[in-house]
Amino acid sequence: MIALITGASSGIGRDIARELAKRKYDLIIVARNEKALMELKDELEKEYNVKVYVKIVDLSIRENCINLYKDVKKEFETIDILINNAGLGTCGRFTDTSLEKEEQIIDTNITALHILMKLFLQDMCLKNKGYILNVASIAGFMPGPLMATYYASKSYVIKLTQGIQRELKMQKSNVKVSVLCPGPVKTNFQKVADVKFNTPEAKSSDVARKAVEKMLKNKKIIFTEWYISLVRIFTKILPDSFFAFCCYFIQKRKIG
């Protein structure tokens, strides 16, 4: 059995790689940080006696996503699990934030995920087995002033996943697709996104463990903390304008 994990060099992706290695999955780990990936490869191969293959790829470039799929298909023919974890964020007023960085966010959080999911899902459907986990966020259920592009990108991930879940169910497919929606997690994301969380942060290792457990149990939407599931309930009851108002001041504190 083999799993492919994007954004595996740190945070949730790195810890999901550890969780799958514990379960004796061979791994294809993907990110831009070669040093971090090689260190993870050495750690997992020594500790869990699995094979780990490193792919240094910038997924914000569309052609790289397609070439990654082609390379994996040629080398391994198929995979059993796809973890779409790679993601970026930024914080600030929409008129002030960098267009170039926002394009990278869209290309990584949306386009790369979409391409890899579509291509690998087609293969999984032919074999009628496999798991896909798309990493979104509780942010995807609400508007996010001062992090508008990031919130919108995670909303896309959630709605895309839910639509495909229904398609697979109607086809009576055995392929399982889940979406992970954590709250704040202590990872390298804060540094990359230029934010500082002022709310409790979950450990990425705990989030990864619960995510893998629930994915393998075919949980459609995965919340790893009980209070995050409550937030989801409130987003169904209260208007978007309320959450936009609250999020504005939460995000403003992150900027400092």
Image: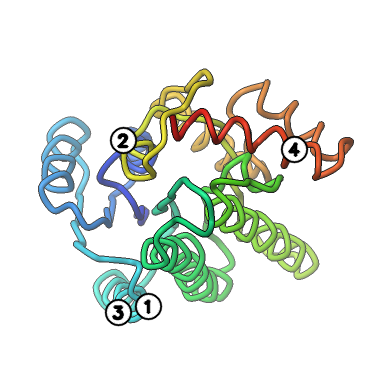
Crowd band around label 3 with a 10 angstrom C-alpha radius: few (<14), some (14–19), many (20+): few
Among the two numbered marks 3 and 4 on one chain, the one whose residue lies closer to the N terminus: 3
Q: Give the spatial CA distance, label 3 vs label 4.
A: 40 Å
Q: Of callouts 3 and 1, which one flags the residue occurring earlier in the amino acid sequence?
A: 1
> How many neighbours does mark 4 have within 10 angstroms: few (below 14), some (14-19), or many (20 or more)?
some
Marks 1/2: CA–CA distance:
28 Å
Which of discs 3 and 1 lies nearer the camera? The answer is: 1
**Spatial CA span between label 2 and label 3:** 25 Å
For marks 1 and 2, the one nearer the N-term is 2
Label whose residue precedes the other's in the sequence (4 or 1): 1
Label 2 and label 4: CA atoms lie apart by 35 Å
The amino acid sitting under disc 1 is Arg
Inspect the image, locate mark 2, and give the three-letter code of the amino acid beneath it: Arg
User: Residue at horizontal 77%, vertical 62%?
Assistant: 166
Residue 243, disc: 4
Q: Secondary structure at mark 2?
A: helix
Residue on which disc 1 sits: 62
| Residue 176 seen in this snapshot | no
Q: Position of residue 3 (x, y in %)?
A: 37, 53
Q: How many marks?
A: 4
Name the residue: 18% across, 40% down: 40
Q: Position of residue 120 (x, y in %)?
A: 47, 70
| Occupied quadrant, residue 255 | top left
Check disc 1: other Cα within 10 Å, few if <14, some if 14-19, many if 20+.
some
Residue kind at label 4, given as amino acid type: Phe
Whether residue 97 is visible, yes or no, is yes
- Measure the C-alpha gap from mark 4 to mark 1: 33 Å
Residue situated furthest front in the rendering = 96
Front tag of 1 and 2: 1
Dividing the picture into quadrants, the one containing residue 43 is top left
The residue where tag 2 is placed is: 18
Residue located beneath label 3 in the image: 67
